[in-house]
Amino acid sequence: MRALLLTAALLLGCSPAAPPAPSPTPPAEVAPTRRPVLLVPVPAKATEGSPRYPADWSFDIRAEEDFSVHVHVIPPGQMVPLHRHPSNWELTFIASGVAEWTGVAAADGGLETETLTLSTGEAAIAPIGAAHQVRNRGESLLAAVVVHQPEFGQNWYLPRDEVTSGARSYLLGATPQTDPPAGWAVSWEARGEHDRDRDHVVLVAAGAGTLAFEDKRLPLAPGDVASVPGGLHHTIAGDDAFAAISLLVPASSGNP
């Protein structure tokens, strides 16, 4: 009988069960020691959008709770209409193209309007509540790098006759800004060694330079945006024509 049962098992294709193979040990996860260094060639990236709808290629470089860096791509002749940010400080840097920046402020006796032409490498600042608009007056795409503190805020569009704030926008001059957000340092001096416990955002306006950290050396060109996390020792250098805006930001909530 035992032989018949064994024969039946063989005919049915059965065989004694093999012991289960041990499960492979998953690789251990290695936590990153720091957030990455970002280097974005904004003028080149701005042209990667749809030829028909290039403004669809607007994109974020940094999006933290306490500050953001956003690229707004504006086709020739188009504009961001008059608006204000009720709780956001804003710096707009022209990475490529020509912009017409218009600020409207309430004053005694009515409204005052100031229109500035911003060329590649120039920047304007809108304090909290300042009404402003940006139009592309050039014949090519306008790539504007917009830094907001805190995070990218709501645009409150409004007709000109509804402007009530006396806050005024202005060009970022050669001297350090006198009224940056609390804890920030904003200036045109980006060269040198940096090892502070603050995020460093560099907006390259002109010339050729380098960003060196650890064993890496990255080239910097006009229109580039570099973002270095706080605590990472790094050096910014450049030729005689090199010019860049330096934004030292309080340690981000995104830090590990």
Image (cartoon, helix red, strand yellow):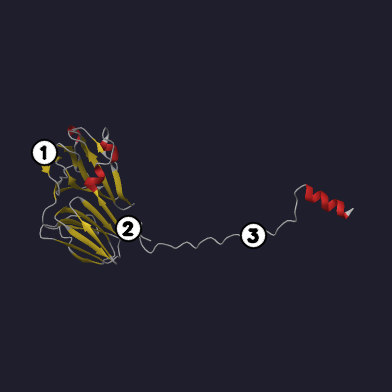
Q: Amino acid at mark 2?
A: Ser
**Depth check, front residue: 112 or 240:** 240
Residue receiving disc 2:
252
How much space separates mark 1 and mark 2, taking CA atoms?
A: 37 Å
Res 219 → quadrant: bottom left
Mark 2 vs 3, N-terminal side: 3
Task: Give the crowd class for mark 3: few <14, some 14-19, many >=20 residues within 10 Å.
Answer: few
How much space separates mark 3 and mark 1, taking CA atoms?
A: 79 Å
Residue 249, position as x, y percentages in the image = 26, 58
Mark 3 vs 1, N-terminal side: 3
**Depth check, front residue: 206 or 163:** 206
Q: Residue at x 21, y 46 (%)?
A: 43
Q: Amino acid at mark 1?
A: Glu
Mark 1 vs 2, N-terminal side: 1
Q: Residue at x 82, y 51 (%)?
A: 7
Q: Secondary structure at mark 3?
A: loop
Task: Give the crowd class for mark 2: few <14, some 14-19, many >=20 residues within 10 Å.
Answer: some
Residue receiving disc 3:
21
Residue receiving disc 1:
112
Q: Residue at x 18, y 35 (%)?
A: 76
Quarter in which the C terminus is drawn:
bottom left
Residue 51, position as x, y percentages in the image = 26, 35
Q: Secondary structure at mark 2?
A: loop
Q: Nearer the viewer, mark 3 or mark 1?
A: 3
Q: Amino acid at mark 3?
A: Ala
Task: Give the crowd class for mark 1: few <14, some 14-19, many >=20 residues within 10 Å.
Answer: few
The label shown at residue 41 is: none
**Depth check, front residue: 140 or 148:** 140
